[in-house]
């Protein structure tokens, strides 16, 4: 059975990458999260997920990250194959929302920046 999670190559894994995206990327404030989006043609698409202590205790932070990650995972098949890195920073609302609600919001975000592929009419 194939793994459905994010591969290591699809995740931001080290502190330097997180800092680079946060420093150089565009800040987009959504309701349940903030997104730092860095668009450059030389990048492979990857995503990182952060939940600080302002979100709540460990269980809430873990849920917030998990919900953001699941929303992105379901959306990644419709995203352009490369050219961006994104870091999602959870807010308190992220822990109480469902991943489907956040996915719809992420769809709108990626569509606005031209990273969402158009549907094939076939």
Image (spheres, grey):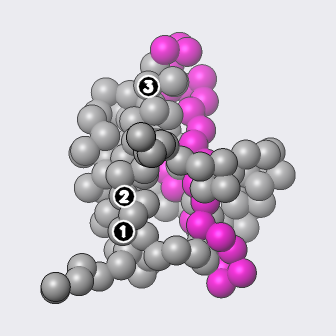
Judge left or right: residue 62 versus residue 84. Answer: left
Callout 2 secondary element:
helix
Which of disc 3 and disc 2 is earlier in sequence? 3
Numbered circle sitting on residue 75: 2
Callout 3 secondary element:
helix
Which one is nearer the viewer's eye here, 86 or 117? 117
Judge left or right: residue 20 versus residue 93. Answer: right
| Residues tagged 2 and 1 counted as in contact (Cβ below 8 A) | yes
Q: Is residue 45 magenta?
A: yes
| Residues tagged 3 and 1 counted as in contact (Cβ below 8 A) | no
Q: Is residue 97 above or below residue 101?
A: above
**Which image quadrant: the N terminus?**
top left
Q: Can residue 46 be seen by looking at this rendering? A: yes
Judge left or right: residue 101 versus residue 46. Answer: left
Q: Which residue is mark 3?
A: 63
Residue 30: percent from left, percent from top = 39, 53
Q: Is residue 121 magenta?
A: no
- Across the whole image, how many numbered discs are drawn on residues? 3
């Amino acid at each position: 059975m194939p793994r459905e999670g994010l591969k290591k190559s699809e995740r931001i894994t080290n502190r330097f990458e997180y800092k680079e995206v946060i420093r150089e990327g565009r800040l987009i404030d959504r309701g349940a999260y903030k997104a730092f989006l860095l668009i450059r043609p030389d990048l492979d698409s990857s995503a990182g997920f952060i939940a600080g202590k302002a979100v709540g205790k460990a269980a809430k932070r873990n849920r917030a990250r998990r919900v953001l990650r699941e929303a992105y995972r379901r959306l990644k098949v419709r995203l352009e194959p490369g050219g961006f890195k994104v870091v999602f920073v959870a807010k308190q609302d992220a822990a109480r929302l469902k991943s489907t609600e956040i996915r719809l919001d992420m769809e709108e975000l990626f569509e606005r920046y031209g990273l969402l592929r158009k549907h094939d009419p076939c």
